[in-house]
Amino acid sequence: MIDKKEVEHIAKLAKLDLKESEIKKFQKDISEILDYFNLLKQVDTNNVKPLFYPVEYSVDSMREDKENSQTLETINRIIESAPERKERYVKVKKIL
Amino acid sequence: MNLCELTILQAHKGLKNKEFSSVELTQAFLNRIKKQDKKISSFITITDKQALLQAEKIDKDISANKDISVLAGIPMAVKDNILVNGIKTTCASKILENYIAPYNATCIDKLNKLGAVILGKTNLDEFAMGASTENSAFFTTKNPKDLSRVAGGSSGGSAAAVADNLCVYALGSDTGGSIRQPASFCGVVGLKPTYGTVSRYGLVAFASSLDQIGPITKNVEDAKIVFDVIKGKDNLDSTSVDIKIENSKFEMKNLKIGIPKEYFIGGMDKEVENIIRQGIAKFKKMGIVIKEISLPHTKYVVPTYYIICTSEASSNLARYDGIKYGLFKKGKNLIDVYLGTRGQGFGDEVKRRIMLGTYTLSSGYYDAYYLKAQKVRALIKQDFDKAFEQVDVILTPTAPTPSFKIGEKINNPLEMYLADIFTSSVNLVGLPAISINAGFANSLPVGMQIIGKPFQENQILEISKSFES
């Protein structure tokens, strides 16, 4: 059973604000699921290369570093999606 | 003729022969949605004005005797994690409740170019995380065959809409079975294409090495029609590839179907097993060779899938921070904005998966979980590679049970995860797979899954079509 401190640590890493009741519930759920994940310990993966993508990419998918403009309509929609903004700037809290 | 019961080809014929107009067809669906959807709850947003405008355009082309595509004027529904320009895309989450898509997903662009009519956006498990649509932040979609049961997930809204004739066809997305399992539960056809064949541009990402968009339809022929339109390499998705259609005219009688023995060891509903075995017998009668195969790493599929998809999800969902779009909760400083926004915007299952993925990727655990899972994934792929040396396609049940009661599994996340036991291996390896209806267990649909070799959608579609007839 992972302890409460670890759950709080994970929540902090994931930037999730959890209520006390949530921490208790997730502690139980996550412990159970992590136990289940430990099933993989049974598999011998010596000398096995990890498979990060299901398809072998032999194609060069790089493109030229050139600007690809969006329509003004799209740009406006994107800017207007920002909850806090000033004119055409997205506002964020200061970090320095 | 009930317009809402038509397939794509039937509707296309009707439009071309001027038996009815696209506006009439669209209005028939809008009327039916108004009447029925309060029972089913498959739609989050209904785009009636836009749908009728799209239909009018096509009617003009038809009156002018212009050539129209087979999908022109045909009403469809789109899962609400696929962006449709100018329309809300919520992912069934409070964190995107009022988010308006600023552009079209590539598959939507393709369909629009051919004159598709979009009726609305369908319900899903929040951020596509779930197997029942009960994780939607808004409401649960009911199974049209039994309103006390789930429509399956995560594309439950799309599957229910097709099953209840609320649209001719729909788009869903599949990361561990999210097109195939709801198709199985609702008695319709669901196709998950080979990874890379359909662009993911405009699909809200859940797990980037697993996600694919695919059609949910009334029959196999319709699935092929939609797949042929939405497939293709897209410069906006660097994981997309072009399928080399080898025009392989294969002979059905030369095909070999593999039955994985590990999939039939307990844990499956007796009724489901009977129906699948009857399906196998039907193929035998057609003269197709049935061979028992082994997929030795089967019992490791679900933990492998859940380690990988939650890890990728923890990364993909980091973008929901209250700054660029979506829900915003005020805070004294930046961290508080993040904590409050995400704490209140995400549902339980999403939080659970983000935390699991954060843990498995974190320092000290990355090797034991994430890296280990990616290695086991390689072994699971080897299992399939070896099997495909002996057989052409693999046949399995789509899900271990028919649709379950609403509320039955929601309090046991692990039990819910096991619903993906037959479908998630397919996503890990990137194979194409289709679910078709194989029968009914106490009036509840039971789906059969046919898995093909990479890029062999044509084969699995042909085999499914012959089973259907």
Image: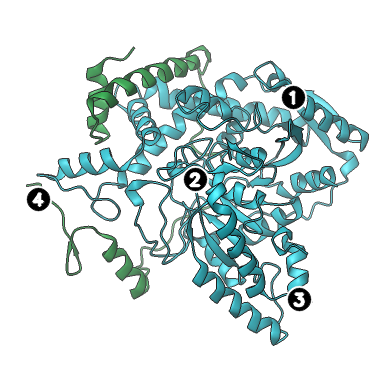
Chain colours: A green, B cyan
Q: CA distance from mark 4 to mark 2?
A: 36 Å
Residue at 45% across / 25% down in the picture? B411
Q: Which residue shows up at 23% across the image and 50% down it? A: B328
Q: Is residue A49 visible?
A: no
Q: Residue furthest left?
A: A96
The residue depicted at 71 percent of the width and 52 percent of the height is B218
Report, in whole angstroms, how far the alpha carbon at label 1 lies from the one at label 2. 27 Å
Residue B444 shown left or right of residue A29 in the figure:
right
Q: Residue B258, percent across and down?
A: 77, 29
Query: Are callouts 3 and 2 both on one chain?
Result: yes
- Residue B91 vs B364, above or below: the answer is below
Q: Residues within 10 Å of mark 3 (few under 14, many from 20)?
A: some
- Above or below residue B176? Residue B60 is below
Q: Residue at horizontal 50%, vertical 72%?
A: B49
**Element type where label 3 sits in the image:** helix
Q: Distance between the Cα atoms at labels 3 and 1?
A: 43 Å
Q: Are marks 1 and 2 in contact (CB under 8 Å)?
A: no
Badge 3: chain ID: B
Mark 3 or mark 2: name the one nearer the start of the chain. Answer: 3
Q: Amino acid at mark 3?
A: Lys
Q: Which residue is disc 3 drawn over?
A: B16
Chain letter of the residue carrying label 4? A
State which mark lies toward you, 1 or 4.
1
Dots 4 and 2 on the same chain: no
Which circle, 3 or 1, is nearer the viewer? 1
Give the residue number, with chain letter if any, for mark 1. B271
Tell me, for residue B124, which label it has, or none. 2
